[in-house]
Image: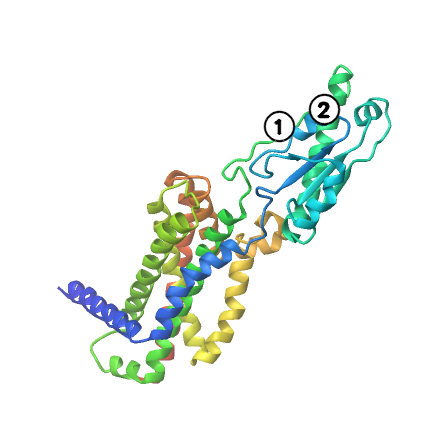
């Protein structure tokens, strides 16, 4: 009976947190912005890959090699090359009809087979800076690869060496939007859960309602658990909405794995990060201090967890230290599920690590919370 009453009290305290959140328009606006506009902006602001770049080719050689080079440019990186004459190049670039114009000179195939190094001119419209920056390298690689393969075949394959057959898995066209949207969602789950939980505690402290709770028959553990489950549920629901509608429908980003497995990982992660939010709030004692402390904690959690830079590229000491952070394991599990379609049989070690770290954080936060309210009781 006492156990039933304990959970009933936690439930009612959690409902109180929902009502407090509903009366805070700034927090509601932050939640809406974080899981809609911020996701969309981060996805579309990623460095633009080469996609349907316009290209024209001036084929002054009209040889099998020049035709082979022309046929090597195809979607989705390039549009089908348009033929131009040498006199049409400048007017076409002036009008902005093409980003790239490739001029293959007369006698190109003959000079290549003779061992000479003929020059191929590439004209680039640099006003389209994002495509011009990356596209020049792509054009150079395509031309060089086609010339090398053509020469090797003409010489009986003696110069082929090792041929690299590259296949892109999980993101065949290297769409940066696929990476940016999902990683922004993962990072926002961490950020907002810490903010909401810490703000909920500080709001009660500043408004004086925490003292009212302490004279009631409730324990510090019940107060903390109520804040953890209520704010965690808000973030979990917002994350599900963002994944289903903003990421999958608006941005048209495919999700390979089970959404339920991702939400399970997110729920365990929220248990850890909401506990961390309580801990930071007990350390800060005011919203301005909490904001400054949040910057010091949140940036390392997001930048060093593997979501921005692969962990393998970091120093070994940083990798070892970040194993104690729940974000490291959450990012690994979320990427495995959303990008590669992994199931529970693959990500269970990460889920177990998140649960263990969350339990430790909850225990430390509860101890600190009890100490912080001793003087208020």
Is residue 54 depicted above or below 289 in this figure?
above
* Quadrant, the N terminus: bottom left
Colouring chosen for the image of the structure:
rainbow
Residue 103 location (% of width, % of height): 75, 36
Label 2 and label 1: CA atoms lie apart by 13 Å
Please tell me the numbered disc located at residue 149.
2
- Does 321 sit left or right of 193 as displayed? right
Q: Which residue is mark 1?
A: 165
SS class, disc 1: loop
The single residue placed furthest to the left in the displayed view is 1
SS class, disc 2: helix
- Which sits in the foreground, 375 or 158? 158
- Which sits in the foreground, 360 or 167? 167
In front: label 2 or label 1: 2
Residue 43 location (% of width, % of height): 50, 54
Q: Residue at x 63, y 35 (%)?
A: 81
* Quadrant, the C terminus: bottom left
Q: What is the quadrant of residue 127 in the picture?
A: bottom right
Residue 189 location (% of width, % of height): 41, 59
Q: Earlier in the sequence, mark 2 or mark 1?
A: 2
The mark tally for this picture is: 2
Q: Residue at x 79, y 24 (%)?
A: 109
């Amino acid at each position: 009976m006492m156990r039933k009453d304990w959970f009933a009290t936690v439930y009612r305290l959690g409902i109180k947190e929902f009502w407090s959140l509903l009366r805070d328009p700034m927090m509601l606006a932050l939640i809406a912005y974080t899981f809609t506009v911020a996701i969309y902006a981060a996805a579309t602001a990623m460095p633009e890959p080469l996609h349907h770049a316009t290209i024209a080719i001036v084929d002054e050689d009209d040889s099998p090699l020049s035709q082979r080079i022309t046929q090597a440019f195809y979607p989705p990186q390039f549009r089908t090359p348009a033929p131009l004459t040498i006199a049409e190049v400048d007017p076409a670039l002036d009008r902005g009809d093409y980003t790239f114009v490739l001029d293959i000179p007369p006698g190109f195939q003959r000079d290549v087979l003779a061992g000479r190094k003929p020059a191929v001119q590439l004209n680039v419209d640099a006003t389209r800076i994002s495509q011009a920056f990356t596209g020049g390298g792509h054009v150079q690689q395509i031309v060089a690869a086609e010339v090398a393969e053509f020469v090797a075949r003409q010489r009986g394959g003696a110069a082929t060496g090792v041929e690299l057959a590259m296949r892109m898995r999980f993101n065949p066209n290297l769409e940066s939007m696929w990476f940016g949207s999902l990683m922004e969602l993962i990072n926002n789950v961490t950020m907002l859960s810490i903010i909401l939980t810490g703000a909920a505690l500080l709001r009660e402290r500043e408004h004086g309602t925490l003292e009212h709770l302490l004279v009631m028959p409730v324990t510090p553990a019940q107060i903390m658990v109520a804040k953890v489950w209520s704010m965690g549920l808000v973030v979990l629901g917002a994350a599900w909405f963002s994944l289903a509608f903003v990421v999958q429908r608006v941005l048209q980003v495919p999700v390979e794995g089970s959404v339920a497995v991702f939400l399970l990982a997110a729920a365990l992660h929220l248990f850890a990060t909401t506990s961390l939010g309580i801990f930071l709030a007990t350390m800060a004692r005011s919203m301005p201090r909490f904001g400054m402390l949040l910057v010091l904690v949140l940036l390392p959690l997001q930048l060093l967890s593997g979501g921005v830079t692969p962990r393998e590229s970091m120093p070994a000491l940083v990798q070892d230290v970040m194993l104690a952070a729940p974000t490291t394991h959450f990012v690994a599990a979320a990427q495995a599920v959303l990008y590669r379609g992994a199931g529970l049989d693959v990500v269970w070690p990460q889920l177990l690590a998140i649960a263990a770290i969350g339990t430790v954080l909850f225990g430390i936060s509860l101890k600190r919370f009890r100490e912080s309210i001793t003087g208020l009781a």
